[in-house]
Amino acid sequence: MTATETEQAQLRRFRITRRRPGAERSRVEEFDVAVGPWTTLLDALREIRSHQDRSLTLRYSCCHASCGTCGMRANGREVLACVTPLASLGAGPVTVEPLANARVEHDLVVDMRDLYEGLEPTGRPLIRQDEQLAGQRQPGPAFARFEDCLECGLCVSACPITGSDPLYLGPAALASAWRTVAEPRDADPSQVLAWVDDEQGCWRCHASFECTEVCPSGVDPAGAVMALRRELTRRKLGRVTMRGRRRR
Amino acid sequence: MVADLKEARQPAPAQRGRGGTTAWILQVVSGVLLVVLLGAHIVTQHFIVKGGLRDYAQVVSYLSNPVVLAVESLFVVVLIWHAMLGLRAVLLDFGFGPRGQARITYAVTALGAVTAAYSFWLIATIAAKG
Amino acid sequence: MSATARAGRPARRPLRGAVGWARGRHLGSVAFLTNRVTGLLLIGYLYLHLGVLYLLTEGSGSWASVLHLFKNHWFLGLESLLILFILVHGLNGLRLALVGTGVGVRHQRAWFAAAAWVSAGLYVLVVLAMFGVV
């Protein structure tokens, strides 16, 4: 910290939920860290790890909200620690917990495999450079945001249904499914639509919009789920009224 | 590594969903109908007759009108349908597999049928007293 | 089903039990919670109501005795609360009918505010009408 920041440094208390690998229960441990006006949550956690408790386990990588690795809950809210200034977390002690709706592996590190595997069925939106050169359509601004998904898991943690229903596809997978439907890029969207048309698919969502509220990347998963529902409703009504012969 | 990137990026969901669009459409339609039917029911039961609520004779007389009978019957069916679909939605949030879902659907359908049967019996019995 | 569940392995995540869904803090979660609670209470009321109506099959005497109870001011107050639940559930339900089918999703917060205000306004009218002021 600079000289000015040292003058302004205060002690901030952190109550961190910790769990050893394979342990049945978690415990809460308190740490006090000298913080300045610009200190982020990640800065403070690294400070604890560097100077107070080497065993504190967490994930981080890019430190600028690009990799999606440092997701956790601060004062009950899903955040990316690297871009969460402590100044935004009120004045009192900060409660730090791992993401919800994912198995805790160690302290603040959770098992992300459900999330990653859930995204696989929607295909990988990769474009080869030679295809770009061959004049293939580039993603327009309306669709680029779906590819902004960092796979950080904040939406899955915030979703109320993911917590009670082990079979729910979840906001991340559904947002990715919508991307495939909205911009197929020579893939077949009907398979993905058929996949999400399930009581544990897009119809399980109850429009709490928590996923969209916490997404650090502007993906709007709730909007994606509703768009999938609109598309499925339109197709079903089209079949029923026999008016839906136009190809979308 | 995959040989053909084009193949790797195709969506390949493991299986088809079992649907849910119809249940949603029914929930929406029944809900919208209820805004009218339930609204009408509350107004006619609470705010039409002097004193608000109807006494026995007034109830019997009210049900003697065939239009009233038809509307109240429709109201009962739509209400029970919406309630059962809602109950089913709450239960499905707890992640039952295909067999569990089928059982829940069957159970709410049965409950709905019994409730409707009782309701129609009520209406018929009271109307007959007129 | 989740991809892992469909692959034959159960999802690995821990569940938060029967009230885990009530965690959310934003407007959408408030709407969800309100609709769920009012919906379940209204189902309870439905069966209570159907039970009470049985008295009508027993003749005017039975009905008259409960009617006296229902016209009591405290009871009317409770009934007005019931109507408030119906208003909230119905108006937020209209919001869900739209938003949940992908219509007007961007305005979902505004829809909820509108539903809340209209419910409040209609509730005031109902109370006034019930207590004979209107």
Image: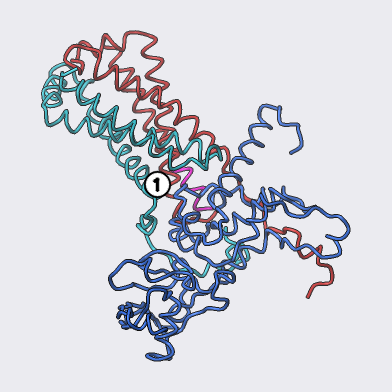
Viewer-proximal residue, B112 or C12?
A: C12
Provide residue C16's location: percent of width, then percent of height.
Answer: 39, 63
Chain letter, cyan: C
- Rendered hue of chain B is red
Provide residue A173's location: percent of width, then percent of height.
Answer: 60, 58
Provide residue A225's location: percent of width, then percent of height.
Answer: 57, 49
Where are the magenta residues, as a range?
B99-108
Viewer-proximal residue, A121 or B65?
A: A121
Which residue reaches farthest right?
A134
Membership of C88 in magenta stretch: no
- Which quadrant of the figure has residue A218? bottom right
Viewer-proximal residue, A199 or A178?
A: A178
Viewer-proximal residue, A61 or A222?
A: A61
Chain letter for mark 1? C
Please indicate whether residue B85 sits to the left or right of residue A11 in the image.
Answer: right
Q: Which residue is mark 1?
A: C32
Location of the N terminus of chain A (image quadrant): bottom left
- Rendered hue of chain A is blue
